[in-house]
Image (cartoon, rainbow, N blue to C red):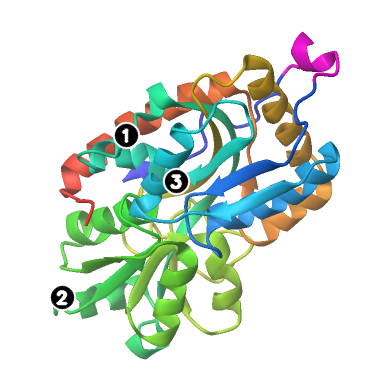
Amino acid sequence: MKIPFRTLLAGAALAVCTPAFAQGGAYPAKPVRFVVAFAPGGPADIVARLVAQKLGDAWGQPVVVENRGGAGGNVAAQAVAKTAPDGYTVLVTTSAIAVNQSLSKNPGYDVERDLIPVSVMASSPNVIVASLALGANTLQEVVEKAKSGKLNYGTAGAGTTPHLSAEYLFKILAKVPVTHVPYKGGGPALAAAMSGEVELVSVAMPPAVPMIKSGKIRGIAVTSDRRVAALPDVPTVAESGFPGFADYTWVGLFLPAGAPPDVVARLNGEVDKLLQQPDLRERLAAIGFEPVGGTPRQFSEYLKTELVKWARVVRETGATAE
């Protein structure tokens, strides 16, 4: 499955300030709330907290992070879509929002109608990890063990890209039976692997990096098109016997439909500035994130391609929102 992230957004220029906020508009005049669609410890939460701290410092207003996990990110998306479109409630979610439009029979919102894409902050490969108790060191060994039909794999939730990646990898390419166990975030899924509750986890790479490096879980394969600096000893899926396979998870910001254009532009422009700061870029890179940025228009165009791509993968895998 060749579905790389390196696309329209790569190398995007900074958003241009509009006259409304260039003249010193009031936004933000009070604390801003980042509603994270997954539990603490996952990729959306990690990026949200790094950006929120810097954004609050730049604005002189607190940016409060609130985790509202559930239904593969749909719970938070539904809530934010119904809030006042004043720019003070911001959705932080992942590429799961594109998957869920086709995976869920009724996600409770329409991402193109009810939300405004503001910025893709960062992207990351996914990684397949194994519990130490499984006793597998390579993807081929995992596939052999999966033939028994007794392996479970955890994810941050049904509808996340690691969920669809694993379904495609195991059921379509490797043709082995595995059982999906959805959690409310990457953090809980990884904790389940460490405890032996599940044998495998498919998750965006950043929350798994420190656990792999400390030896608490075993890195089996990354879904990037080449090895990543944060985990140089972990081979790619393509190296492990499945050529052409590449997949990524992105973390993005959305506002409710109807948010003023100057507010959308200011939030986008400020985030883009932060993503150029060397210290933030270094912190993201150390755990496997690539800063992205770009304009709302570029994000909107990219989102359309994601909706088409993931609808196809959902059809091919027969994945469901358990």
Front of the two marks 2 and 1: 1
Judged left or right of residue 232, residue 138 is: left
The image shows residue 150, relative to residue 247, as above or below, that is below
The image shows residue 2, relative to residue 224, as above or below, that is above
**Residue 152 sits inside the magenta stretch:** no
Q: Quadrant of residue 69?
A: bottom left
| Amino acid type, label 2 | Lys
How far is the residue under mark 3 from the one under mark 1? 23 Å
Q: Quadrant of residue 215?
A: bottom right
The span picked out in magenta is 16-25
One can see residue 65 in this view: yes
Judged left or right of residue 121, residue 257 is: left
Residue linked to disc 2: 147
Which secondary structure, mark 2? loop
Q: Position of residue 256 (x, y in %)?
A: 51, 28
Determine whether label 3 and label 1 are within 8 Å by CB: no
| Upstream in sequence: badge 3 or badge 1 | 3
| Amino acid type, label 3 | Ala
Determine whether label 2 and label 3 are within 8 Å by CB: no
Judged left or right of residue 194, residue 15 is: right
Badge 2, how many Cα within 10 Å: few under 14, some, many 20+? some
| Upstream in sequence: badge 2 or badge 1 | 2
Q: Position of residue 153 (x, y in %)?
A: 30, 70
| Amino acid type, label 1 | Lys
Residue linked to disc 1: 309
One can see residue 243 in this view: no
Q: Say which mark, if any, is on residue 76.
A: 3
Which secondary structure, mark 1? helix
The image shows residue 183, relative to residue 77, as above or below, that is below
